[in-house]
Image (cartoon, grey):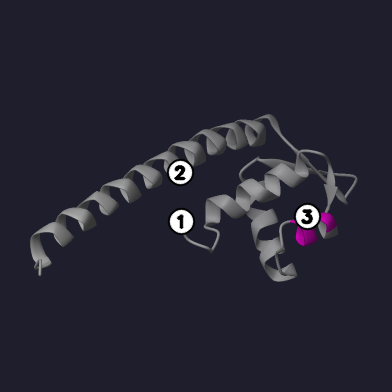
Amino acid sequence: MSKYRDRLQIIANILSIASTRAKKTQIMYQANLSYKLLTRYLGEVQASGLVKCENKECYVLTVKGREFLDRHDHYSKRRRSLEEHINRINDEKAVLENMCFNKES
């Protein structure tokens, strides 16, 4: 798995933080984002209807945002499972290649 977060992971992280009502600075620090990235992502998730801003400072998760988080959690679990399976297959391939191409003394 990559050490960098992809776009969906960042969005899921923002939504997870907003699920307990959060201010912009809380989201920025907890999601480990620059102000510029935070502004961009918050604009996107608001435009998509995943979060809404209450009282001009507090972000809260919408029903659609909760559904996104649930689906993203399911997706992440399946992806990890597949990555583990692929790693085991690649390990087996390496064993087979070693058996074929390494000469015994």
- Which is nearer the eye, 17 or 4? 4
Which residue is painted at 54% across and 50% down in the image? 8
Q: Nearer the viewer, mark 3 or mark 2?
A: 2
Query: What separation in Å lies between label 3 and label 2 (alpha carbons)?
Result: 26 Å
> Secondary structure beneath disc 1?
loop
Q: Residue at 28% of width from left, 53% of height from top?
A: 91
Q: Nearer the viewer, residue 17 or 83?
A: 83
Residue type (three-letter) at the residue carrying disc 1 = Met
Q: Point out which mark residue 65 bears.
A: none
Horizontal side, residue 101 vs residue 90: left or right: left
Query: Is 27 part of what is drawn in magenta?
Result: yes
Type of amino acid under label 2 = Arg
Query: Closer to the N terminus: mark 3 or mark 2?
Result: 3
The image quadrant that residue 32 belongs to is bottom right
**SS for dot 2:** helix
Label disc, if present, on residue 1 of the rendered structure: 1
Q: Where's residue 18, x and y in %?
A: 76, 44
- Checking the image for residue 27, the label placed there is 3
Q: Which residues are magenta?
A: 26-30
In contact (CB < 8 Å): disc 2 and disc 1: yes
Image disc number at residue 80: 2
- What x and y, as percent, mark residue 1? 46, 56
Q: How far, Cα to Cα, is label 2 from label 1?
A: 8 Å
- Which residue does the image show at 10% across and 70% down from the upper left? 105
Q: Residue furthest right?
A: 55
Q: Quadrant of residue 62?
A: top right
Query: Who's the residue at 84% across and 60% down the image?
Result: 25
Quarter-of-image position of residue 31: bottom right
Mark 3 residue element: helix
